[in-house]
Amino acid sequence: MKNMTKFLAATALTAVSASAAMADKWDMPLAYSATNFHSENAAQFAECVTAATDGAIEMVTHPSGSLFAGNDIKRAVQTGQAPVGERLISAHQNENPLFGIDSIPFLATSFDAHEKLWEVAGPKIAEVLADQNLVYLYSVPWPPQGLYFKKPVESVADMEGIKFRSYSTATARMAELTGMLPVQVEAAELSQALATGVAESFISSGATGYDRKVWEHLTHFYEVDAWLPRNIIFANKDAWDALDEAQQAAMTDCATEAKTRGLQMSKDYTQLTLDGLREGGMEVGPASDTLVGELKEIGETMTAEWLESAGDQGKAIVDDYKAMQ
Ligand code: PCA
């Protein structure tokens, strides 16, 4: 009898640990709101992984910086505090200049050009991430970047002294070179920054202005098509290595689908959100020739600075990309 009790207890314990091992919860921190297309795409990716692994990996997204703020997500995944996450990679250009390749002004200004740039740059960036204990899963571009203001702006002189919300090294540098005052603010905090006057202008896609309902505070969106920055979705390498081959394959397949779906969503959101800004009451249109000309000059300065910091490897990527044109 005693033996039987022991046997039953041991069986129960095995069952408990087996079910714990079966449902491996993968929390996925996201910086952007649940309704943003990147977040919607990530939620579908998470569902895909959960279904494809028969629930062995239960992937759950946490949008709006609710688990980790945008700026902390990459380190959280590197250190294993979260097994997977999404991050705007150009925000980390200070770690490695290659992370800023998608924010070289006017280098790749359309979805097609940007995808070509990424064909060359993506694998190199995946290598850098691998050295940081991260496994590159997929990435999706934001729509082209334009400028938001609360007054008409016809030239760089009109920007003098404006408080400008930045999201990366390149956006902060652009502010400096146009005489604006950069302040780094997460997209999740953007509405509040505009409401309190911490920021009164920013560069971003129509998508982010639309998500944050910025027509409540601002009046003008100028389509500049300066660049298309990217969000990268990566996993912690130790968490990845602990998966079996079938689970890794399931995740890779879901990532391939998410990459294609996300690109299409980004394209679709471009027009939809520009229309949304208009419906909100904003003036939406191309920047003046004067402004574009001045921004292109500033872009040349920034390109030279980037090339200098990124050295031979950076130059090789840009040259290979240009050769594809
Ligand atoms: N939206 C993000 C990054 C680029 C974009 O279009 C943001 O403004 O934070």
Image (cartoon, helix red, strand yellow):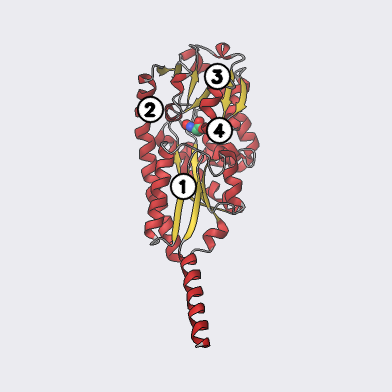
Q: Amino acid at mark 3?
A: Glu
Which type of secondary structure does the marked residue at label 1 adopt?
Answer: strand
- In the rendered view, tell whether residue 47 sits above or below residue 160: below
* Image position, residue 90 (x, y; %): 56, 37
Q: Split into 4 quadrants, where in the image is the C terminus? A: top left
Q: Amino acid at mark 4?
A: Glu
First of labels 1, 4 by sequence position = 1
* Image position, residue 99 (x, y; %): 57, 40
Q: Is residue 223 something one can see in this rendering?
A: no
Which residue in the structure is indicated by mark 2? 273
- Whether tag 4 and tag 3 are in contact, CB under 8 A, the answer is no
Residue labelled 4 has its Cβ within 8 Å of some atom of ligand 1: yes
Which type of secondary structure does the marked residue at label 2 adopt?
Answer: helix
Which residue in the structure is indicated by mark 1? 61
Label 2 – label 1 distance at C-alpha = 23 Å
First of labels 2, 3 by sequence position = 3
- In the rendered view, tell whether residue 68 sits above or below residue 168: below
Left/right of residue 164 with respect to residue 229 in the rendered view? right
Residue occupying the point 51% across, 78% down: 9
Which type of secondary structure does the marked residue at label 4 adopt?
Answer: loop
Label 4 – label 3 distance at C-alpha = 14 Å
Which residue in the structure is indicated by mark 3? 200
Label 3 – label 1 distance at C-alpha = 31 Å
Tell me the mark number nearer the camera, choosing from 2 and 1: 1
Q: Is residue 133 something one can see in this rendering?
A: yes
Q: Which mark is residue 186?
A: 4
Looking at this view, is 312 or 88 the one in front? 88
- Crowding near the residue tagged with mark 3, few <14, some 14–19, many ≥20 C-alpha atoms within 10 Å: some
Looking at this view, is 212 or 260 the one in front? 212
- Whether tag 1 and tag 4 are in contact, CB under 8 A, the answer is no
